[in-house]
Amino acid sequence: MTEPSPHPDSPSRERFPVVVIGAGPAGLTVGNILRAASVDCLVLETESRRFIEQRPRAGVLEEWAVRGLERRGLAANLLERAGRHTACEFRFDGVGRRFAYADLTDRHHFVYPQPLLVTDLVREYAEVRGGDIRFGVRDVTLHDTGTDRPSVSYLCSETGQRRVIHCDFVAGCDGARGVSRSALVPEHARIARHDYGIGWLALLAEAPPSSDCVLFGVHPRGFAGHMPRSADVTRYYLQCPPGDDPGNWPHERVWSELRKRLAATGAAPLKEGRLLEQRVLDMHDYVVEPMASGRLFLAGDAAHLTAPIAAKGMNLALHDAFLLGDALAAYLTRGDGSGLAGYSAACLRRVWDYQEFSQWLSDVYHGTASGDPYHAGTTLARLRRLFTSPAAAAAFAEQYLGTAGHY
Ligand code: RFL
């Protein structure tokens, strides 16, 4: 719910055409697109710049997302430094089967850690395109977003004073734990939720990758994943009970379990290393529909969460941001409101498609460990089909890379 405007005599009042809440991939991309169109905007971020430039998260970017960044002048470092992935490997029944998706689609994934992308986007926005960004803000509150005179207020961490920013539009890009979503719900939007009832222990290891590609271990003990991030850092995942305590996973147990679940005849041993990050993620999804109400537009995880099962979240955040940034710029520079009118529907088509793929993939990853022999049997049939049916392989590759012509 939005709150009424603070008193008009409140101490500091400013005006920007757009206030962007949140400096993640979505918010920073919207901000950069607006600045390139010479639209003034303000980005508000609760954390420090240092913190957001180091927060480890995603790493896998789809090719269309990278081309979208490139077209907007935001991919120079990425194209120079990112790794390219052309294949993944499923390990099940003790055998590794390589799935060379680039051969089927002529497309590949880029691997570029999210903190590096965020660092590039902040620098470009603040230092090259002259955008205003304020870090460490507290108690961000949205006001009057159902009217054509919305505002956003926050407590300034330096002065402790509440500052009020008047604007034409609010872009709610504040992620899964932000405040923007609650300004839409429940009056104007529906939230669809899905809980997998599964946890993943997300690990970052100070260790070189143990293979040149992503590995998916589909094992009766539970899923395990291996995702190269850089020459010295590898992300691993281990399926665990939801809500499990990371303290239950000492170094030895982690590596012993990874070795078992990623075992395959003839495979090189895992390269072990210090665990830099260890947290349990409860696998769940949500989708807010519509993603806009009045002058408030949500983008990225603020509007929809996809559990990291299929590595889709940052890609969807960028897709929203491209559409929203372009639509706001079109409206504010040329009075063309068509992009804003179609924004939510255009985002949600890809969002739902990716949600469905995540659910499908979750069944594949977790089926053999479900304890249900019927589920385990169908899971293995699905996996084998990827390697026996060219049609099934092509369909998987298209969804895995997000290359469908239309959503
Ligand atoms: P973000 O990145 O969460 O950014 C939101 C920003 O808003 C700030 N904020 C606020 N600012 C102002 N006022 C408030 N009240 C605020 N509340 C919060 C936050 O501090 C933050 O800076 O959302 P955005 O921009 O929508 O981007 C979404 C992506 O970050 C997310 O979808 C991905 O990280 C998901 N994800 C992956 N996605 C991929 O596409 N490929 C991957 O390989 C991939 N791997 C992952 C992932 C997510 C993971 N975790 C931690 C859930 C791996 C992991 C482990």
Image (tube, rainbow, N blue to C red):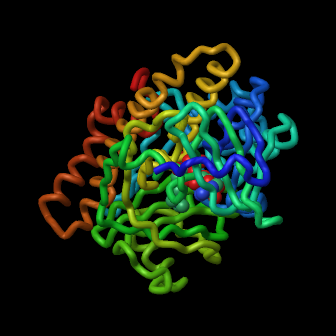
Position of 85 with respect to 54 (left or right) is left
Q: How many marks?
A: 0
Q: Is residue 68 above or below residue 23?
A: above
**Measuring 30% from the left and 54% from the top, which residue is drawn there?**
194
- Where residue 356 appears, as percent x and y from the top left, is 32, 42
Q: Considering the image in quadrants, where does the C terminus appear?
A: top left
- Where residue 50 appears, as percent x and y from the top left, is 78, 62
Asked which quadrant contains residue 154, the reply is bottom right
- Where residue 90 appears, as percent x and y from the top left, is 39, 53
Q: Look at the image and tell me whether residue 58 can be seen.
A: no
**Measuring 40% from the left and 34% from the top, which residue is drawn there?**
348
**Measuring 70% from the left and 37% from the top, which residue is drawn there?**
31
Q: Which one is nearer the viewer's eye here, 24 or 388? A: 24
- Where residue 82 appears, as percent x and y from the top left, is 69, 44
Asked which quadrant contains residue 145, the reply is top right
Q: Which one is nearer the viewer's eye here, 328 or 389? A: 328
Position of 406 with respect to 329 (left or right) is left
Where ligand 1 lies, by quadrant?
bottom right
Q: Which one is nearer the viewer's eye here, 12 or 228? A: 12
Q: Is residue 363 above or below residue 337?
A: below
Q: Is residue 209 above or below residue 41?
A: below
**Measuring 46% from the left and 36% from the top, which residue is drawn there?**
293
Q: Is residue 397 above or below residue 180?
A: above
Q: Look at the image and tell me whether residue 200 can be seen.
A: yes
